[in-house]
Image: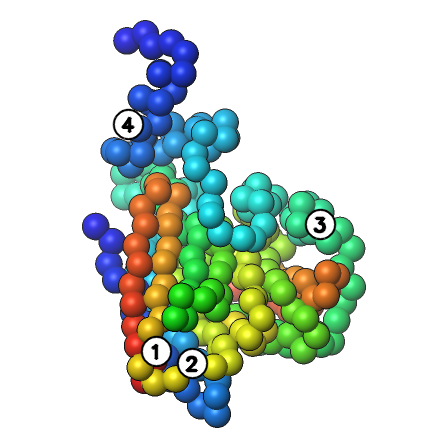
Amino acid sequence: MSSPTKMRASVTNGVTEVRALMQHEMETGRRKDETGKLVPAWYITDFNVLHNGRTVLEGQFGTSVSKNPFLVFRFKGGKAGDKLSLSWTDNRGEKRTDEAEIS
Amino acid sequence: MQLQGRNAVDIGRRHALKTGGGLGLVGVLAVLGLLPKSAWAGVDRKVFEATSLKDAFKAMGGLAPADSSQILLDVPGAAENGAMVTVTVESKLPRTEQISILVDKNPTALAENFTIPEGTEPFITTRIKMAQTATVVVLVKADGKFYKVGKEVKVTAGGC
């Protein structure tokens, strides 16, 4: 089971700043565990963020993104109470979507 | 167990997706193009396999990006922990549509790629892993052309 993305957003002068922390191990496939065995690659490959159903950011990750990927980005428009949703999918095909309200 | 033809592939694929444990199999299926493609825009996933900047640029369609002072890149001069290096990018280039972050000496060069829709500022803060002291390179696609900027980060303990 994956853990929820933590997301906060606030509006200043008509620009919404979003801070998101996706919770994921982001294993590169090159790390060895205590017994010396390679830990298989396991990482988020794609994500997108919707504001009231419209895409405001989308991206693709490789294995060089840090554990628990963290993002800050800004888009025009958005007001307090609007819904944001962040979806990701990983290389095992697991997906999750989490929502937050702009404050 | 001997399975043949398309059914064998289907069963194998379902099994791989269901268990999630057979990464080797998923990898093989991905190579064979049997896994569903991402519904989202961006670069071809193959670009993430490029092991050098040059190959990554080429695969992204921007073989010789021009250096640009219109891309602001903020990275630490030195990072104690290569597993978490904070990178902030801001592009002043009109019609910035894509921002990619690469590391020249990581096992694979491309770390991440962002598609910037209209209305979203060409600005991003993110955290990446660095295997060793290397140059963080930002590749920006603006108005259909590629531009880049790079800065060195000295890494004490690699995080790849």
Q: Which residue is mark 1?
A: A82
Q: Locate residue B156 relative to residue A80 in the image: left or right.
A: right
Q: Which residue is mark 2?
A: A78
Q: Locate residue A36 relative to residue B111 in the image: left or right.
A: left
Q: Which residue is mark 3?
A: B61
Chain under disc 3: B
Element assignment for label 4: helix
- At label 4, the amino acid type is His
Q: In the figure, residue B153 lies in which quadrant?
A: bottom right
Say which of marks 4 and 2 sits in front: 2
Total numbered badges shown on the rendered structure: 4
Element assignment for label 1: loop
Residue A71 position in % (x across, y down)? 43, 69
Whether labels 4 and 2 belong to a single chain: the reply is: no
Q: CA distance from mark 1 to mark 4?
A: 40 Å
Whether labels 3 and 1 belong to a single chain: the reply is: no
Say which of marks 3 and 1 sits in front: 1
Q: CA distance from mark 3 to mark 2?
A: 34 Å
Element assignment for label 3: loop
Q: Are marks 2 and 1 in contact (CB under 8 Å)?
A: yes
Regarding residue B148, the answer to whether it shows in the image is no
Q: Are marks 3 and 4 in contact (CB under 8 Å)?
A: no
Residue B67 position in % (x across, y down)? 76, 67
Say which of marks 1 and 4 sits in front: 1
Instruction: In the displayed orientation, state which residue is furthest to the bottom.
Output: A13
**Which one is nearer the viewer's eye here, B27 or B18?**
B18
Residue B66 position in % (x across, y down)? 78, 64
Q: Residue at x 33, y 73 (%)?
A: A83
